[in-house]
Image (cartoon, helix red, strand yellow):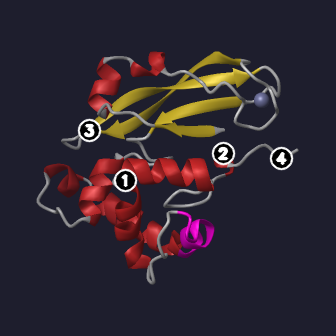
Amino acid sequence: MQRIFPCALTPEEYVATEAHRQVRPELLCPLGCGCAGRLHGHGTYERGITTSIGKIVLMLIARFLCVGCGRTISYLPDFALSYRLVQARTFAAFLDGEHARREVQTWETVLQSYRRRTLVNAAAVVRVVGCGFGRAPPATAEGLWPWLKEACGSMSSATRRLVTDFRITLFKRYQCHQPARV
Ligand SMILES: [Zn+2]
């Protein structure tokens, strides 16, 4: 299972400070097996992430094992998007029309594909969230990002709240965000 946690660092800072070592798992297994305090460190995995100037760095993601249900839970910092290389802030800048930014220009083609994917997925997000953010849902797919930004403040916060509270991302509903099937 994948969890998204709030992280005030940039990807560069996360890598430089080895922030994956500071990640603490939740007290209760998020898979819903009912086990408390039994998440043990279970190594890391490596993935790429773009920096603020559009370069790619590799970062380590902390992983834990629940000894109750025998499943693993990884903790992704919220500057990263699930299964996407380009960081959340760059995607937000792209959607906000900041096309002069170097990192946006570098990843423009990829960001266009991200945008297409969110437009296809917008109806699913709106269906799941409904009025869950305390305001009326957007009328169009294009209105999804302005609505999320207004409600959550940033792409990082939006992606974390979507996964944590609604078990969906901007792009797709992933099995790894769902609770365990009993
Ligand atoms: Zn468990």
Q: Nearer the viewer, mark 1 or mark 2?
A: 1
Place of residue 89 in the rendered image (x, y in percent of width and height, measured from the top left) = 30, 49
Place of residue 149 in the rendered image (x, y in percent of width and height, measured from the top left) = 35, 61
Residue labelled with disc 2: 176
In this view, the residue farthest toward the right is 182
Residue labelled with disc 1: 155
The earlier-in-sequence mark between 4 and 3 is 3
Residue that appears at 42% across and 71% down:
144
Quarter of the rendered structure image containing ligand 1: top right
Q: Are marks 3 and 2 in contact (CB under 8 Å)?
A: no
- Residue 181, which numbered label? 4
The earlier-in-sequence mark between 1 and 4 is 1
Local crowd size for mark 1, using a 10 Å CA cut-off: few (<14), some (14–19), many (≥20): many
Q: Amino acid at mark 2?
A: Cys
Q: The residue tagged with tag 4: helix, strand or loop?
A: loop
Question: Does the segment drawn in magenta span residue 122?
Answer: no
Local crowd size for mark 3, using a 10 Å CA cut-off: few (<14), some (14–19), many (≥20): some
Magenta stretch in the rendered image = 123-132
